[in-house]
């Protein structure tokens, strides 16, 4: 990736791009969803594994 004629990001293997950008983007939106559900008083589904609320019981 270049900007203004200067290299910003070096070429990377495809798996590194997928893991670094795509997966982090998915994790970000999952976190947003969980924060939204908790702030509106809804139950967070445990489809992603154990959730914080389960540890309080």
Image (cartoon, rainbow, N blue to C red):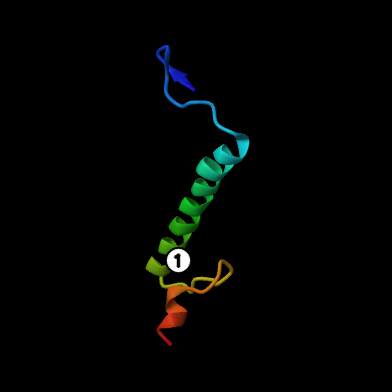
Disc 1 residue crowd, few under 14, some 14–19, many 20+, Cα 10 Å: some
- As drawn, 18 above or below 52: above
Give me the residue at 44% from left, 56% from top.
32
In this view, the residue farthest toward the bottom is 57
In this view, the residue farthest toward the top is 5
Image quadrant containing the C terminus? bottom left
Give me the residue at 41% from left, 62% from top.
35
Give the percent coordinates (x, y) of residue 39. Answer: 38, 67
Query: Which of 12 and 57 lies nearest the eye of the viewer?
Result: 12
- As drawn, 45 above or below 10: below
Tag 1, which secondary structure?
Answer: helix
In this view, the residue farthest toward the right is 14
Give the percent coordinates (x, y) of residue 24. Answer: 49, 48
- As drawn, 54 above or below 26: below
- As drawn, 54 above or below 14: below
| Residue corresponding to mark 1 | 37
Query: Which of 44 and 42 lies nearest the eye of the viewer?
Result: 44
Give me the residue at 46% from left, 27% from top.
9
The count of marks equals: 1
């Amino acid at each position: 990736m270049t900007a203004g004629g200067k290299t910003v990001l070096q070429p990377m293997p495809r798996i590194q791009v997928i893991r670094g950008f795509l997966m982090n983007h998915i994790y970000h939106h999952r976190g947003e969803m969980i924060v939204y559900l908790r702030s509106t008083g809804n139950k967070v589904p445990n489809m992603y594994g154990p959730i914080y609320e389960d540890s309080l019981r």
